[in-house]
Image (cartoon, rainbow, N blue to C red):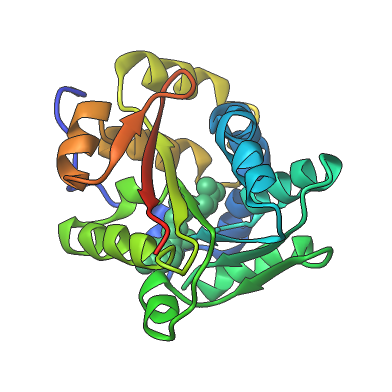
Amino acid sequence: MTLAVRDTQLRELMDDPACDLSRLNATLRRFAVVNRLVSGWGAVYRSRVAPYLRGLGRPARVLDLGCGGGDVIARLAALARRDGLAAEWLGVDPDERAVSVATRYAGSGIRFEATDSGTLRSRGDRFDLVLSNHVLHHLDPAAFAAFRDDSLALVQGPSGGVVLHGDIARGHLAYGLYAVGITPLAPGSFLRTDGLRSIRRSYTAPELAAALGPGWRVEQPAPFRVLAVAEARHA
Ligand SMILES: C[S@@+](CC[C@H](N)C(=O)[O-])C[C@H]1O[C@@H](n2cnc3c(N)ncnc32)[C@H](O)[C@@H]1O
């Protein structure tokens, strides 16, 4: 096994529409723990999300594209509420199985909807902040390009906006630590197989910058993480 190049042939078990529902639900629910430990959104909230929301001076509209089990947007909403930052939070995912798990977090300004980035874009929805977690590495080149362009179009409102796509940075240390660390959480879920496949499908920071192209920056906000950032200017 080599991690020198992305393994784009690998398919994650949870991406199979016919996968075992109880294992899928366990996977989606336990993402809350895994994301809390590895996804680095606490650091991104402090360095980017909170200052941006504070600077807007009005309630923001925030969108989580590919929200899965909904834990990332729920955590960001809780942090913002603690800091007195008003916002409307929408999590979307085209997979209805994910949305039905995510709805446990609905309420207190958080909504979920079974839809995708292209549909939101074509119906003219606009947001101040669009984010995603662990979506980019799932996508084939055509879906990646559409997702990138949709996310940017979704912040092209009159006051501009920011896009933040967080993902894993591929590497041997991340792979080895995940293989060991996931052991207590893995039984009855896809977390072990899909997590390791995710790392093998993921980008390094230079690869992601090349795939995204002009207008995007790729940062490394935490160990084993990449964060793609784009800013739409005020009209
Ligand atoms: C691995 S899951 C990540 C779930 C969640 N964000 C997390 O970090 O736990 C990737 C999700 O992206 C969703 N997705 C794929 N293409 C999308 C699109 N164009 N718009 C919105 N969601 C999309 C998939 O349905 C899938 O649930």
Judged from this view, the residue extending furthest toward the bottom is 123
Image point (60%, 27%), residue name: 43
Judged from this view, the residue extending furthest toward the front is 235
Q: Is residue 112 above or below residue 124?
A: above
Whole-percent x and y of residue 173? 37, 13
Residue 108, image quadrant: bottom right
Residue 99, image quadrant: bottom right
Q: Is residue 104 above or below residue 175?
A: below
> Would residue 16 be seen by someone viewing this image from the given angle?
no
Q: Is residue 47 above or below residue 96?
A: above
Q: Quadrant of ligand 1?
A: bottom left
Q: Is residue 166 left or right of residue 114?
A: left
Image point (40%, 20%), residue name: 174
Q: Is residue 208 left or right of residue 94?
A: left
Quarter of the picture holding the N terminus:
top left
Whole-percent x and y of residue 61? 62, 63
Whole-percent x and y of residue 12? 36, 51
Residue 169, image quadrant: top left
Q: Between 17 and 154, which is closer to the camera in this rendering?
A: 154
Image point (58%, 49%), residue name: 27
Quarter of the picture holding the C terminus:
bottom left
Image point (46%, 18%), residue name: 223
Whole-percent x and y of residue 167? 41, 38
Number of numbered discs visible in the structure rendering: 0
Judged from this view, the residue extending furthest toward the top is 173
Q: Between 43 and 29, which is closer to the camera in this rendering?
A: 43
Q: Is residue 200 left or right of residue 214?
A: right
> Would residue 84 be seen by someone viewing this image from the given angle?
yes
